[in-house]
Image: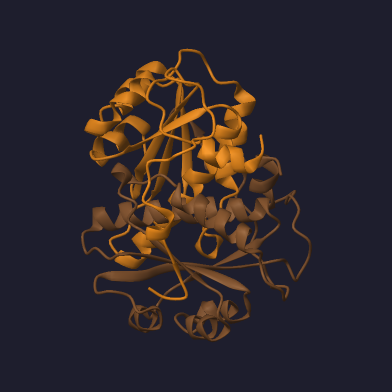
Chain colours: A orange, B brown
Amino acid sequence: METWDAIRTRRKLDEYAPGQIEEEKLTRILEAGRRAPSSRNQQRWHFVLVRDRDQLRRLSRVWRGAAHIADAPAAIGVVAPHSDDPRESASINFDLGQAVMSMMIAAADLGIGTRHAAVEDYDLAAEILDLPEGLRLTWMFGLGFPGDRPLSPVQNPDRRDFDDVVHEERW
Amino acid sequence: METWDAIRTRRKLDEYAPGQIEEEKLTRILEAGRRAPSSRNQQRWHFVLVRDRDQLRRLSRVWRGAAHIADAPAAIGVVAPHSDDPRESASINFDLGQAVMSMMIAAADLGIGTRHAAVEDYDLAAEILDLPEGLRLTWMFGLGFPGDRPLSPVQNPDRRDFDDVVHEERW
């Protein structure tokens, strides 16, 4: 798919269709994340691909908004160090956003929809994923073919107007 | 360009070629950012497109690693609310990472290279951009045609091995 189409096609999936995602597609999506840029190329991330139904169900309980993970054919958990330093935390989370966006655009390109989930219960998530001390399941997202409506470029995204968002030279 | 090519083509530009970027290309890049997903669709961002050489020179002083902005044909400053709440700050920065990645992939698709810059002197940046109270120039990046070597898919990115980054089901 053309890049501009993939960027415009990515949207929040409301419903996952049943059916597995091909292995090579998941590999490509994860590879897009692996290639993402990061501050001083630190790559402070691990990606945990989850497809086991019981494991997906357990993960769906780490946040009230994560229930949809229980129905997804797959999820990718983004694991990163936790920092109490505001500047380092901002940098880590910015980099994780870059990696996740890269994976979501790669997924849209393959006809695969995605949906974010935040994490609230870090301890429960760490227990489910057997995470080492100091690492957190920081974000995750579900992946699947669309069960709601086909994926195609969104013509009028629900976003603030271009002129409200974009400034020239200064405020 | 095919999406997978654009994702693999994006890399840090070492040198900007002189010459302006066409208006419609900049518009498309900014539109990619405007369309990015965000927590509860809050879109906590403004994008300031800077092309004036004096303004670019001033911005190059907001961080020791931002000197390259002085040589860029254009830069996009990402302005966002600052929060002292760790969870909100993480969420804002994650969303900004998503918006920036989307813009960088859109740029790569158009043959335009990009390069990140962080910000250290928020007060100076706010003065340069006339920012209202409570908003910060949080991140920025330069854009330009490559002055170093042509943009093409990176075959062997300088990244940790796939098997080191990716886990299945659990740690």
Which residue is at a point 56% across and 60% down the rendered structure image? A41
Please tell me which residue lies in front, A141 or A150. A150
The residue under the point 62% across, 45% down is B161
Q: Residue at x 45, y 15 (%)?
A: A17
As drawn, is B109 to the left or to the right of A98? Answer: right
Depth check, front residue: B165 or A77: A77
Query: Where's residue A125, x and y in %?
Result: 30, 35
For the N terminus of chain B, the image quarter is: top right
Relative vertical location of residue A29 with respect to residue B29 in this rendering, above or below: above
Q: Is residue B44 left or right of residue A52?
A: left
Question: Quick one: quadrant of the C terminus of chain B?
Answer: top left
B152 vs B58, nearest the viewer: B58
Position of A88 relative to A48 (above/below): below
Task: Count up the numbered dots.
Answer: 0
Note whether A112 is above or below B9 in the view shown. above
Question: In this view, which residue lies farthest toward the top?
Answer: A18
Q: Is residue A171 left or right of residue B86?
A: right
The location of residue B69, given as percent across then percent down, is 57, 77
Determine if residue A44 is in view: no
Residue B100 in view in this figure: yes
| Image quadrant in which you'd find residue A50 | top left
At which x and y percent is residue B62?
Answer: 44, 81
User: B59 or A92: nearer the eye?
Assistant: B59
- Dividing the picture into quadrants, the one containing residue A85 is bottom left
Measured as percent of width and height from the top left, residue A168 is found at 47, 71
Q: Residue at x 30, y 49 (%)?
A: B42
- In the displayed structure, would residue B146 be above or below residue A80? below
